[in-house]
Image (cartoon, rainbow, N blue to C red):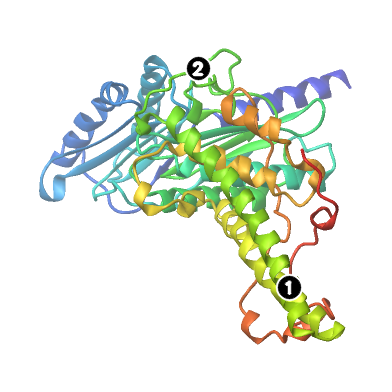
Amino acid sequence: MGTIISVSLLFHILIVSISLISAEKCYDTGNFRANSTYANNRDLLLSSLASNVTANGGFYNTTIGQYNDTVYALVLCISDPSAEDCASCVNSAIQELIVACPSQKEAISWGGDPVPCIVRYANRPILGTMELSPTDSGYNIGHIKSNLTDFDHIWTSLMTETVARASMNSSRLKMAAGVVNLTSSEKIYVLMQCTPDISQSDCSYCLRNTVTEFRRCCFGSQGGYVQKPNCFLRWDLYPFYQVFSESPGPPPDFITSSPSPTNTTSTINEGKGGVSTVLIIAIVIPVAVSLVLCYLGFGFLSSRAKSNKYSAQENDVLVNLEYLHLYVILYDLASYVWRHWRDGTPLEVMDPTLTDTYSRSEIIRCIHIGLLCVQEDPASRPTMAAVVLMLNSYSITLALPQEPAFFLHSRTDQGSIPSNEFFADQSKSNSVPYSVDDGSITEVYPR
């Protein structure tokens, strides 16, 4: 029995070790002859990648040759490692690529030692083009022991948020890492990254594909990864690489916990004090406007009802219609922002005139905090004191936002809804579906 357990444990360790080292894919787009011009160009190009990628911040692309002998290359070190680790991974990946694909005109290698990296060459332009294949993936053979329904909700929310943050990160390094509590003793760690040459939308699409593919093949496993030519996903129940080290390392954009910014310079591009001040005002003003609209709206309804002496039934219909109009104005904004957050495009809610004049990480954090304030469950919403603390301290890890109160799921048929049926029968098929929020109709207390 002891022998069986030992062999099983050794087999498990071997599987995990092999799956995280490297993988190569050789394309069927043609071959070259040994000692040909293309062969020499490829060897010369590959030999220059390790030194150049470390000198260029972890991403490098280059071209060598002319006409049919032109070779294009792209290399990325994932997780923003040290120059030494990056060069080590790239050199190892190149050696394994040459062995696995000795005469192919196009190939890719995903290195994994000591950190992940992507090395790719081709006989065609590849820069700026998002591609979803080939794909390399793997998973841990252990299974999630907690409730799978709860796990699915937490895991999906974390993946959605990380896709959004990675795709909207800087053009230099489209990367994001996230951590969330699964149970009182377990956490989920995730790392996502795209090659910085592709667009925000392509990065988001690529990463969403990795999430979908992992769910399709390996849902319920205790961790795994999916690698594509332009993006990378890995998650586990333990910290990995240097991204999740306890000591301060990566910049704030790369981790969910980071030092509180202290610089109050007026340079908006730095993403410091000035932007936060504006956003605090932006959060407070809609609340004040909402209260004013409520008072004015109901005051107007009351005076108009008295002056025109409507019947009780007519007055009820009028109040319902006016309240519905006010409700659409106030709550559709939250629905609009939530849809963009869920789809990984929260920056699209920004004023276009502010393009390139703000810190993406601070904007995303403020939108994140705003969505926490309008969650369906009132008990999950932060207090005003907590909001101020979140805005002033990056050391606080934000909870994942849930669907906002009165989220409008569809508005395609609003124009055809009979006004006297909306409040009369919410179960009818022509009513606007929305999420019920008991907290929104209770007495208001200051927080």
The picture places residue 175, in percent across and down from the top left corner, at 47, 35
Point 67% across, 54% down: residue: 291
Q: What element carries label 1?
A: helix
> Nearest the camera: 380 or 253?
380
Point 54% across, 23% down: residue: 243
> Nearest the camera: 379 or 219?
379
Point 74% across, 42% down: residue: 381
Question: What amino acid type is highlighted by mark number 2?
Answer: Gly
Residue 248 sits above or below residue 155 on the image? above
Spatial distance from mark 1 to mark 2, Cα to Cα? 62 Å
Res. 413 visible in picture:
no
The picture places residue 287, in percent across and down from the top left corner, at 64, 49
Question: What amino acid type is highlighted by mark number 1?
Answer: Ser
The picture places residue 263, in percent across and down from the top left corner, at 43, 20
Q: Earlier in the sequence, mark 1 or mark 2?
A: 2
**Picture disc at residue 303:** 1
List the residue tagged with mark 2.
Answer: 249
Count of number-bearing discs = 2
> Nearest the camera: 336 or 266?
266
Give the crowd class for mark 1: few <14, some 14-19, many >=20 residues within 10 Å. few
The picture places residue 435, in percent across and down from the top left corner, at 76, 62
Q: Would residue 399 be found to the left or right of residue 148 on screen?
A: left
**Picture disc at residue 348:** none
Q: Which residue lies furthest to the right in this view?
A: 1
**Quadrant of residue 332 within the rendered picture:** bottom right
Point 77% across, 28% down: residue: 186
Q: Quadrant of the N terminus?
A: top right
